[in-house]
Image (cartoon, grey):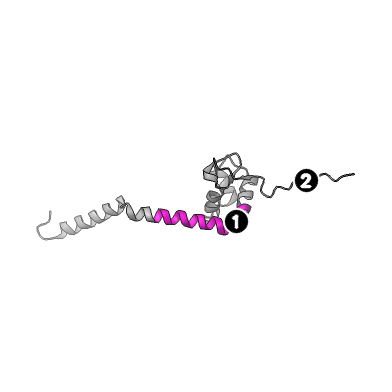
């Protein structure tokens, strides 16, 4: 009598599809990437219940599986996060901040009006 073969799925809620999110590991049936769940959990401090509130289309099981996948592949995913942060920093340095320009203008204006003869 043969023993039935049971296929073990290490991460049944995670899939990698080149046509979805550029092949980034994502929760199966969604476009929610593992990297996004990892950032919200690890960097922003959201709890799994808060993640469910933020992503009501996901289940708690899927959230936990995404976190498990993240911790098993942490160095690779953290490298991806750092690369994205570096890209954002580069863009931020090239594009002037409207708020900073406004602040600089307000400082100049206040200084101008404090000068003798200022309005």
The percent coordinates of residue 73 (x first, y second) are 60, 56
Q: Residue at position x 27%, y 54% from top? A: 103
Q: Is residue 51 left or right of residue 102?
A: right
Q: Nearer the viewer, residue 57 or 47?
A: 57
When asked about the image quadrant of residue 72, the answer is bottom right
Tell me which residue sits at (12%, 56%) in the image: 118
Q: Nearer the viewer, residue 106 or 71?
A: 71
Q: Measured from the top left, where is residue 40 in percent x and y?
A: 52, 51
Question: Residue 26 placed where, x, y %?
Answer: 57, 45
Residue 33 as seen in the image, left or right of residue 112:
right
Query: What kind of secondary structure does the magenta stretch mostly adopt?
Result: helix
Is residue 78 shown in magenta? yes
Q: Residue furthest right?
A: 1
Mark identifier at residue 117: none
Q: In terms of secondary structure, where does tag 2 sit?
A: loop
Measure the alpha-carbon separation of dots 2 and 1: 25 Å
Q: Nearer the viewer, residue 2 or 47?
A: 2
Q: Which region shows up in magenta?
A: 68-89
Question: Looking at the rendering, in which quadrant would you find the N terminus?
Answer: top right
Mark 2–mark 1 contact, CB under 8 Å?
Answer: no
Q: Position of residue 38 (x, y in %)?
A: 55, 53
Residue designated by label 2: 6
- 42 w.r.t. 7: above or below: below
- Residue assigned mark 1: 73
């Amino acid at each position: 009598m043969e023993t039935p073969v049971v296929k073990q799925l290490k991460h049944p809620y995670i899939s990698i599809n080149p046509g979805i999110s550029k092949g980034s590991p994502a929760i199966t049936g969604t476009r929610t990437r593992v990297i996004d769940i990892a950032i919200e959990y690890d960097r922003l401090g959201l709890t799994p219940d808060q993640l469910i509130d933020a992503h009501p289309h996901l289940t708690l099981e899927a959230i936990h599986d995404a976190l498990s996948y993240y911790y098993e592949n942490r160095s690779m995913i953290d490298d991806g996060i750092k690369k994205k942060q570096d890209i954002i920093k580069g863009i931020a340095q090239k594009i002037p901040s409207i708020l900073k320009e406004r602040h600089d203008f307000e400082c100049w204006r206040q200084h101008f009006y404090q000068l003798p003869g200022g309005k």
